[in-house]
Image (cartoon, rainbow, N blue to C red):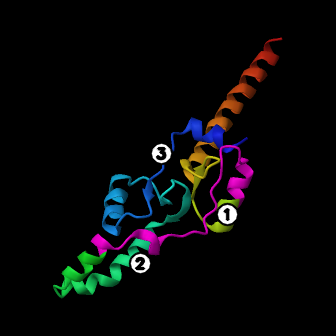
Amino acid sequence: MKVADIKEAFAMVPMVVDCRMSIEDVLRTVVSYAENSCVYVEDEQGKFIGCIRPQKILEYCFPFETMLWRDEANGFLEILHNETITSLIDDTIHPVTDETPVATVITIMGTENVDELPVVNDTGKVTGRISLPSLVQFYLKNLEQSSRAKYCTDELTKSI
């Protein structure tokens, strides 16, 4: 079984941004794709270069909360608006392809302690995502189908 089998069964729309986007624009994108657990970042040529996890955005933004409380928000808002996301990118994430075996995906997720991976094509462009919930859904769907098949086989055998 490969990534393509699961990706087709469960529409997994990735959240992809350009590395030149501002942090403010990425935050707006994150809000509109709330079901995704990370933002995939592509370079100017559309090649995957890393991801931004929500924790990284929080770590970046919340040290400035005291500035907001002291009415010093202008500096903070200027940073959000002008600084690009490159400082937030985790480039250690390993993308997978449609041909990657599911066992490999599970190994990568366990080793890297992530619940989602980008799916890229042969040029490195993000074409989808595979998540832990989609793997579990796929497993349960197959388990249910195989249980039904076994039940039908058992019933057929009884009637013979």
Q: Few, some or many C-alpha atoms within 10 Å of disc 3 (few <14, some 14-19, many ≥20)?
A: some
Instruction: Check contact, mark 1 vs mark 3: CB within 8 A.
Output: no
Q: Which residue is mark 1?
A: 110
Q: Residue furthest left?
A: 71
Residue 137 in picture, x, y percent from top left = 58, 43
Estimate the spatial distance between the alpha carbons at disc 1 and disc 3, rounded to whole Å. 22 Å
Estimate the spatial distance between the alpha carbons at disc 2 and disc 3, rounded to whole Å. 25 Å
Label 1 vs 3, first from the N-terminus? 3
Q: Is residue 69 left or right of residue 117?
A: left
| Residue 105 forms part of the magenta stretch | yes
| Residue 67 forms part of the magenta stretch | no
- Residue at point 71%, 32% (across, down): 146
Q: Which residue is mark 2?
A: 59
Q: Residue furthest top?
A: 160
Residue 69 in picture, x, y percent from top left = 20, 84
Q: Amino acid at mark 2?
A: Glu
Question: Quadrant location of residue 153?
Answer: top right
Q: Amino acid at mark 3?
A: Val
> Which numbered mark, 1 or 2, is in the foreground of this view?
2
What is the secondary structure assignment of the residue under circle 2? Answer: helix
Q: Is residue 114 left or right of residue 146?
A: left
Q: Which residue is mark 3?
A: 13
Q: Is residue 122 left or right of residue 23?
A: right
- Residue at point 54%, 39% (across, down): 10
The answer to which of 52 and 35 lies nearer the viewer is: 52
Residue 97 in picture, x, y percent from top left = 66, 48
Q: Amino acid at mark 1?
A: Gly
Label 2 vs 3, first from the N-terminus? 3
Numbered range of the magenta stretch = 80-107
The answer to which of 31 and 158 lies nearer the viewer is: 31
